[in-house]
Amino acid sequence: MTLIDEVGGPDGDLLGLYRVLGAGGDGPANDPLRRELALRLADPKTLHRCLARRFEQGFRAVVVWSDKVLFEALGRRHEPDLPRVIPIVPNLQGFMREAVEYGMVGAGLRRAWRVGALSMAGMGLRGIGRLGEIKRRDFPTLLGSFIELELADFRRYQPPLVLLQPQMTDLALAMHNPRILEAFARTVAERTGAAPGYITCNFATLMASFKAWGIEPAAIVAPWHPAGYGMRPDVPACEQAARACPAPIWAERRGALDAPLPEQRSHLQKIGLVGVVREDPAVWSLQ
Amino acid sequence: MGIMHAAMLGVIPGGRVAALVDRDERHAEHVRSMGIDAPVFGDLAACLDALRPEGVFITTPTFTHRSLFELCLTREIPAFCEKPLAPTLADAQAMVQAARARPQLPVAVGFMLGHNPLFRKAADLLRRGVPGRIRSFRAVCRLSQVFSPKKGWTFTREQAGGGVLINSGCHLLFVLDLLFGPPRSVFARASGVHNPVEDTLAALLEYPDGLWGTVEVTWSVPGHELQCHDIEVIGTQGTLEVGNDVLRLWLSQKHEEYPAGWSLWPRAALEPRAPFNLSPDYCGDEFYLEVRDFVDAVRRQRPPRVGLDDALRVQTLIDAIYRSAEQRAPVSLAPPREAAHDAD
């Protein structure tokens, strides 16, 4: 079974919950529609019901951040009548929010507490071999440990795909540092066996760098817009890179209110995209 | 912010980080391990003497800006200083004096919204009187960050200069200066909900010709993971709404090329756009553009787009608002300029 078979829903689409819950974008408060949705889905029982309903409608996977409400809604392990979970890691915004509230150490301890003693002990043992890098505060090593901490929350749901959050992907690009991407891919492979995918806001640049660095991504999520908004450096470069990309690509559509129009979908298919990430209010408003 | 600027230098043609400077060299080493191939210094003077870089980005806590900035200037090295300029108006004025003594040196300030074409277009529409005569505005800056007592320099008046207004709301004041110029007087109230510095602040700004507007700044409300700046302007022929991501104009009747009803411009539809974006949800284009502008200003020996005069006007307004909040009385400002900035 291919990754697309495993996670692709109606029209190949994925569900998205990471902006709906307000961890990304400019938060739900600026948009009454999203605010109402966020408040409704902040109840774990309602969220569970919504996820189950979306699964009935054919959505097989949902892209998510680490989130307390989400974990309550998902239950203790993967339920067969819910979409599979595709985590975005690391949730730096969530961590920074806790860090402002509890301090860096406090935020770290809270994460450790959530993960549990057994997982922490395992991480400690694995960390022994990387003590030098950790002591030097080597960024890729610390990132790998941070991702490992977050994946500990997700492992029980057996995610088929894990996505690196866009600021980390694009930081690696800007810094010309493939070690950041390698640390992510290695940690995902070792701790979950899931496929490592990447969210980027600089799709064409990323594909060129992947080629130069010899990295083969399992999946990509990148901005797509009928007017080319957010497609960097420009639309022709993105479309050319998409045609040449061997990995499945899903389109992220910031600010979309509804499903793509049929002509938009056929254009996406023509240039080789699998589908879109449906995080629009329309998909979450469906009863 | 230092990491953001370093990353942007990595993608700007011809840009390169020459060195990292941090009093805690371990911290600099940590940043270096992100992929910056540059030496680390624990002291700025030693770095400037050893390398003589083309320019310096000062992205340290506010209370350190003045000494680092003046050090750059005495070495005749262009500097980009993060906002706000300083904790106090006196420090900011001293920095401006130092810069005016070396007019050939490009010096920039990190008010990145000055690189957002939405605000420039809004200023242009107001200047041309498209929504008619402007009578009032409402300006809001919100962030979900402070819900309990906090520690650190950001929450210490002596080091930061204040609370949410100077740390976060200064961006909003920069935009208001761009749109309306300096006010004639201010009347403000502020409260430290969780901290000794203010967590929430409201001000009434009065301008010549009867224009007035309200400013509301807080970092203690939910729903704004990223800082928003929203301004609503009411004119005799229509209204104008502008924020980080969108500009909306509503006209009661057609004016020049603008139709009656709503016109809308998303940020992504307007040039300049950045070819690389590291912060798509919050001013990613502007972070790229402000770094590129400074690099270009240094190379061409021209003034950067957002300079010290802009920053000093913001600092003057911050100072007046704080004095008003403390005195619980209106505070007058020096006579304003005749008109707002030209919007190019």
Image (cartoon, coloured by chain):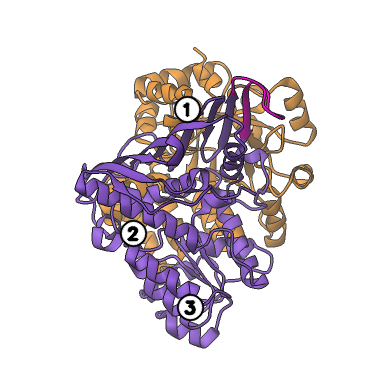
Chain colours: A orange, B purple
Range of the magenta residues?
A: B251-265
Q: CA distance from mark 2 to mark 3?
A: 48 Å
Indicate which disc, 1 or 2, sits on the residue closer to the N terminus.
1
Q: Residue B261 location, x and y as percent?
A: 62, 20
The three-letter code of the residue at mark 1 reads Asp
The secondary structure that most of the magenta stretch takes on is loop
So how many labels did they put on this image? 3
Q: Are marks 1 and 2 on the same chain?
A: yes
Q: Is residue A181 visible?
A: no
Q: Nearer the viewer, mark 1 or mark 2?
A: 1
Q: Nearer the viewer, residue B22 or B257?
A: B257
Discs 1, 2 touching: Cβ within 8 Å:
no
- Which chain's residue wears label 1? A
For residue B5, side relative to residue B173 (left or right): right
Q: Nearer the viewer, residue A238 or A195?
A: A238
Q: Nearer the viewer, residue B189 or A198?
A: B189
Q: Which mark is residue A124?
A: 2
Residue assigned mark 3 = B73
**Image height of A93 relative to A126, above or below:** above
